[in-house]
Amino acid sequence: MTESDISDLNVVILAAGKGTRMYSSLPKVLHALAGKPLLGHVIDTAKTLNPARIVVVYGHGGDQVPDAFAKAGVQFVKQEPQLGTGHAVQQAMPLLPASGLTLILYGDVPLTRPETLTAVCRHPSTLTVLTAHLANSTGYGRIIRDVSGKFLRMVEEKDATAEEKAVREINTGIVAAPTAMLIDWLKALRNNNVQKEYYLTDIVPQAVAAGLTVQSVNAANEWEIAGVNSRTQLAELERRYQLEYAEKLMARGVTLRDPARIDIRGELVCGQDVEIDVNCVFEGRVTLGDGVRIGAHCVLKDADIGAGTVVAPMSHIDSARCAADCRIGPYARLRPGAVLGAHAHVGNFVEMKKVELGEGSKVNHLTYLGDATIGRNVNVGAGTITCNYDGVNKFRTVIEDDAFIGSDTQLVAPVTVGRGATLGAGTTLTKDAPAGELTISRAKQTTIVGWKRPTKKKVT
């Protein structure tokens, strides 16, 4: 294996911790950051290295962890009882060939960059440690070097002397080592420490004793090596993740009114000259075409928004798509299966589900449309409802091109409104409306002369 070849790479992810300070029945690595479990971030990053195999060591929470990642293409092994990081890695060794390089990662350290891990794997013939220099190193194991700067050992804070605690270079826990050597080093671990645990860090003095030059890579960003042990730390990393994503968007030309007030819980793909106002949430995969403007407080999930479309504030779009130059909202809700043609308008307090809305059609006010096919240049008046559900089955409504639907209309599906037809306001349509004609169902207006409103009786 050459210094540049990491094709025969194993990745072991330690994910057995309980997360006591999370105060949760959910295993720590399943808590979400940016809409994805912590462990999911680590697995996805590991996959960018194209490893031969990934092994996740789990423990607390029973089978919740392997169940959550049953389709992730990784192997699982249980650590029980939990006797330290070295013991955890030992559990994974039977699943690995005694060749190549093994990289050790942590399921609660979600933001390490692929570039950083690639650097850690560049020396496959020796041990490489990812370190960081922190202004406040409290809580971390320290890197102890000799006067020439060579690695001597790593010491856990609980076992460190006062002099060692003053060291600012810390061990992140992320290491890469030749698998064959790692197997031997793990066998030699002892639990002669305060915690009575088998520390992975104790492989360092073994590597030094074997005459190896231990390599180190320094993390460029402190957030790359930050782990999650509490709700506060999870929230801090959430903000860091969001800010990093926001900065990437702005570098590509997206205008964010406030980069500190955006939440991306998936993938956001933007064209040119996109503008996003404050407090918007993007989930799943969202695509915004050129010139799209998203108003404040919108939530978009698995949506495809065509070029030039404006989404006004407080709108929710879920698993829907629209063509170019649409107008949506404010307070609009597009549910799964909503498809808007070019230049369509969906206004305030309009809800749509499984609806195809044709080019140039308008649904501007206080309307529910479900299971409907609506043609081009249709106007749907305020208060219109497609009555698509009979309590057991759902039926479809068809409104053909150029139809006009008056306000306060109920269309009892299955029903068809013909091309160019007009429905008078207040109509309850139970039969097909013929093309080009006015259809109306309305009680005759009557005035009762001399009628008086009831008045309250005085209580004696």
Image (cartoon, rainbow, N blue to C red):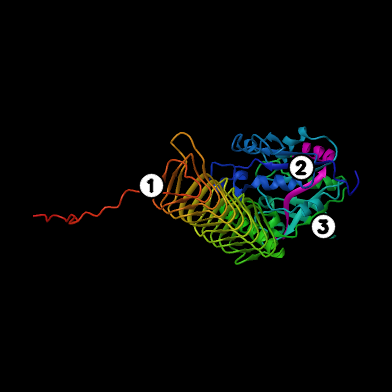
Residue to which mark 2 is pinned: 11
Tags 1 and 3 in contact by the CB under 8 Å rule? Answer: no
What's the residue type where badge 2 is placed? Val
Which mark's residue is nearer the viewer, 2 or 1?
Answer: 1
Seen in the picture, residue 4 relative to 270 is either above or below; the reply is above
Secondary structure under tag 3 reads loop
- For residue 5, above or below residue 163: above
Cα distance, mark 2 to mark 1? 70 Å
Q: CA distance from mark 2 to mark 3?
A: 30 Å
The percent position of residue 26, horizontal first and vertical second, equals 56, 42
Name the residue beneath numbered marker 3: 146
Question: Residue 366 occupies which quadrant of the picture?
Answer: bottom left
Secondary structure of residue under mark 2: strand
Q: Is residue 74 above or below residue 443?
A: above
Residue type at the position of mark 1: Ser
Which residue is pictured at 65% across the width and 36% down the height? 66
Percent coordinates x, y for residue 330 in the rendering:
51, 60
